[in-house]
Amino acid sequence: MQRDRKKFSQIPAYSGLCDFVDNRERNIAAALQSELSKTLEATANAEKFMKVVRKYTSFKELTSTLLWEFVEKIVIHESEALDGKRRGKLRRQEIEIYYSFVGKVELPD
């Protein structure tokens, strides 16, 4: 292929096409490298998370150590009345738990 490029490099259309193909190959390679890096990072984070999960699969009480290792943050949203009363007893409050290394995990209802 390199020999063909030298042979036809004097033809402007061919030269432009070669440049286009070279640029396209570089862009695709860069995009693939980026996706590979993201996948490797996600895999490493999942492995770290599973290591913590395995460590605490049979805990008897919730300790501060367990929380510090297992939970990144907890977001508590404002409560809302379910009975239409401002200070009613029926209230709903959304709580989001973000786990270390994997973030928020959506569980099915």
Image (tube, helix red, strand yellow):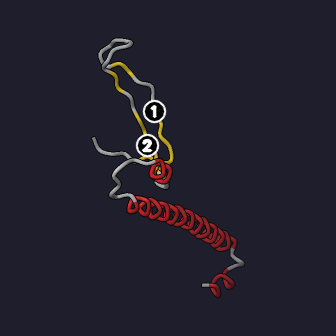
Name the amino acid, label 1: Ile
Q: Quadrant of the N terminus?
A: bottom right
Report the disc number at residue 109: none
Asked whether the beta carbons under mark 1 and mark 2 sit within 8 Å of each other, the answer is no
Q: In the picture shown, does residue 79 fall above or below 27?
A: above
Q: Check disc 2: other Cα within 10 Å, few if <14, some if 14-19, many if 20+.
A: some
Q: Nearer the viewer, residue 96 or 71?
A: 71
Q: Nearer the viewer, residue 4 or 74?
A: 74
Alpha carbon distance from label 1 to label 2: 9 Å
Picture residue at 33% right of the left edge, 14% below the top: 88
Left or right: 31 with respect to 58? right
Picture residue at 55% right of the left edge, 65% below the top: 37
- Res. 76 image quadrant: top left
Q: Check disc 1: other Cα within 10 Å, few if <14, some if 14-19, many if 20+.
A: few
Q: Quadrant of the C terminus?
A: top left
- Residue extending farthest right: 10
Q: Residue 82 in the image: x percent, y percent?
A: 31, 19
Report the disc number at residue 76: 1
- Res. 92 image quadrant: top left
- Residue extending farthest left: 109
Q: Residue 100 in the image: x percent, y percent?
A: 48, 52
- Res. 90 image quadrant: top left
Q: In the picture shown, does residue 101 fall above or below 20?
A: above
Q: Residue 59 in the image: x percent, y percent?
A: 35, 54
**Is label 2 in a helix, a strand or a loop?**
strand
Q: In the picture shown, does residue 4 fall above or below 69?
A: below
Picture residue at 38% right of the left edge, 13% below the top: 87
Q: Residue 62 in the image: x percent, y percent?
A: 39, 47
Q: Where does label 2 land, which residue?
A: 97
Name the amino acid, label 2: Ile
Picture residue at 41% right of the left edge, 35% below the top: 95
